Image: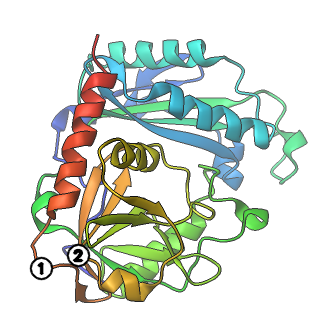
Amino acid sequence: MKDNSNTTHDAEDDPRNKDIKIYINGEIVPRNEARVSVYDSGFMLGDGMWEGMRLYNCKWAFFDEHMDRLFDSCKAVSIDIGMDRAGILDALTRTAAANDMTHDVHCRLMITRGVKVKPFQHPALSQSGPTIVIIMEHSKPATHLQAKGISLATVPQVRGLPMSQDAKYNSHSKLNCIIACLQAEQAGADEALMLDPHGFVNTTNACNFFIVRKGEVWTSTGDYCMNGVTRQKVIDLCRANNIPVYEKNYSLVDTYGASEAFLTGTFGAQTPVSQIDGKKIGDHDGMGPVTARIRELYKELVERNTQG
């Protein structure tokens, strides 16, 4: 296992995060006092949904898109959040104000089915309503990843069929991805490249995945990967700026021969991939030209979305 591994969530160190305040079911408490019951369904079973969001200029980027995903997922698994979008926005606003946070902030919003009356699986045992937790940190992605890139290893763990555990659930049950990440680390890589059930290139354990071939941007069909907000924004930006983009099945052969590869996610935006399975991607170090253009277009989009 690598001692100097990178991850797509590497952030610049910020000592202010030692003293953050955390929202738990309407109360905002110091980090060292934040507690959730051991009977909570999220702790006990991974029974919950979450969203990762970023705050810029006192405004949450792509808030509506994140709420669409959160509310759809909670409805699908019959979790009653107990508040509407305005209520969640108010909770986010209160937490940010309590932490004096306005810019370059990362948030993890977590909704679980709540505390159980007995330590068993059945959802009906969660009878007191949901547990809602908001963790915010001062957070800027580490700049070294843009110059160096991240290494991936293809792993045996796959993103499965929708009838097993649909990848479109941004659920607390992340064991599938954790196993993939462990397999990648044991292969000497930073993170995992996961295939779909048919053997086509799909996603990583933490982010959506793209390649560039002859000026074209390729990503998976989307059938077996997280319906990432940043993923969709990149696809939309390519279409709006005359960058050919395709959602399609493609194999590792196509991937190894790509001129560029990059990951997308709310935290890191676009993170370049330097090598896959020990094979260097492209003839550049770090970020390639197409990825750099998309990153700049995305940065401009975030600025427009968070103005005013």
Q: Quadrant of the C terminus?
A: top left
In the picture, measured across the screen, residue 14 lies left or right of residue 130, that is: left
First in sequence: mark 1 or mark 2?
Answer: 2
The residue tagged 2 is 259
Figure check: 156 above or below 148? below
Figure check: 92 above or below 232? above
Local packing at callout 2 (Cα closer than 10 Å; few below 14, some 14-19, many 20+) is: many
Q: Position of residue 220 (x, y in %)?
A: 50, 66
Q: Position of residue 49 (x, y in %)?
A: 63, 43
Query: What kind of residue is marked 2?
Result: Ser
Is residue 114 visible to the viewer in this orientation of the structure? no
Local packing at callout 1 (Cα closer than 10 Å; few below 14, some 14-19, many 20+) is: few
Q: Quadrant of the N terminus?
A: bottom left
Q: Position of residue 116 (x, y in %)?
A: 79, 40
In the picture, measured across the screen, residue 241 lies left or right of residue 181, that is: left
Which element carries disc 1, helix, strand or loop? loop
**Residue at the (70%, 26%) spot, across then down:** 81
Is residue 278 visible to the viewer in this orientation of the structure? yes
Q: Position of residue 17 (x, y in %)?
A: 26, 35
Spatial separation of the CA atoms under disc 1 and disc 2: 7 Å
Circle count: 2
